[in-house]
Amino acid sequence: SFVHQKCRNIDTVYLGSNIHRLNVPDNLVKWSQEWSGYNPPAHTDPKVDGAVWADPEIDEKTFQPSWNAIDGKINRVSYVCQYSFDPVTLRPLNPIGRTGLSGRGLLGRWGPNHAADPIVSRTNDNGDLEFVAVQRHDNGEWAIPGGMVDAGEHVSQTLRREFAEEAMHGIVDSENLDELWNNGKELYRGYVDDPRNTDNAWMETVVFNFHDSKGLLKNVALQAGDDAKALRWIAVNSNEPLYASHSHFIDLLKESHSH
Ligand code: RP5
Ligand code: MG
Ligand code: MG
């Protein structure tokens, strides 16, 4: 079964900190594997601490979230499973298992942090399937131009908004692309092996493919914006390394276009 890798990386510090994860061997990832002395470093980024877009500390009296449920405008449901809780700290537990770091790191929500990933694709003049990728500001890796679902936002809005922000330089998307956005196909819904994940906070996403079979994007200026510093089309067969588990999503894209 699937074990996360990128959120167990001990070769570099956790992004934006000088903290190293505790090494978690493959066979001890699952919480069901006994590890009595497991005591990873704790880290919540100062940017998250007290931020309006983030949850408060878990033991704050006023914080009464509905776990494993739609909690007002916040989706606290995991696409993976009903998550459980650390019996001592009462923090949600990463459904894949240990990451060697507790707390929230750079993530705002305890438990699932929901994102959406728009894969905008086309077949180029050489007949190659390619997709729009952006280079992330935070760690320089190439990625699908996805982002977090805002409180109360519908995933279909997030997909469109994030693509406009990161790949159209924030230009409010014109009606030109309505046909593209209205014909998306869901490829994936679930956990993301994101390097920011911790034992108590993790990324989940919905991945949609918007394939431009009519050349609608020929009339649109694609340009990196927001938290993207560069943009280019990447051929699915180039096997370029991508951020988090985005390579897996591109494999699903290939599969969906192969028949
Ligand atoms: C990944 O992080 C998701 O797949 C999505 O692409 C991205 C969302 O986070 P930000 O781009 O907003 O940092 O886990
Ligand atoms: Mg964004
Ligand atoms: Mg983003």
Image (cartoon, helix red, strand yellow):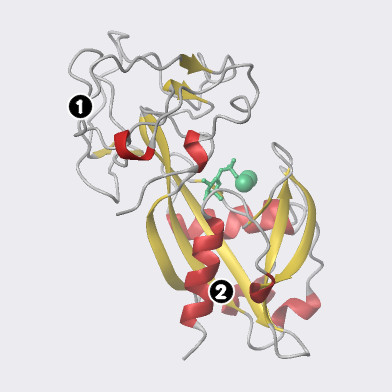
Decide if ligand 1 comes within 8 Å of the CB at mark 2.
no
| Mark whose residue sits in front, 1 or 2 | 1
Inspect the image, locate mark 1, and give the three-letter code of the amino acid beneath it: Glu
Q: Nearer the viewer, residue 66 or 28?
A: 28
Element type at mark 1: loop
Which comes sooner in the sequence, label 1 or label 2?
A: 1
Q: Which residue is mark 2?
A: 210
Residue at 44 percent of width and 39 percent of height: 151
| Quarter of the view holding residue 235 | bottom right
Inspect the image, locate mark 2, and give the three-letter code of the amino acid beneath it: Phe
Provide residue 45's location: percent of width, then percent of height.
56, 18
Query: How many residues crowd around disc 1 within 10 Å: few (fewer than 14), some, or many (20 or more)?
Result: few
Decide if ligand 1 comes within 8 Å of the CB at mark 1.
no
Q: Image height check: is 230 above or below 129?
A: above
Q: Is residue 55 left or right of residue 134?
A: left
Element type at mark 2: strand
Provide residue 53's location: percent of width, then percent of height.
50, 27
| Quarter of the view holding residue 223 | bottom right
Which disc is residue 34 wearing? 1
Q: CA distance from mark 1 to mark 2?
A: 44 Å
Provide residue 84's location: percent of width, then percent of height.
20, 32
Residue at 71 percent of width and 42 percent of height: 227
Image label count = 2
Q: Image height check: is 163 above or below 253?
A: above
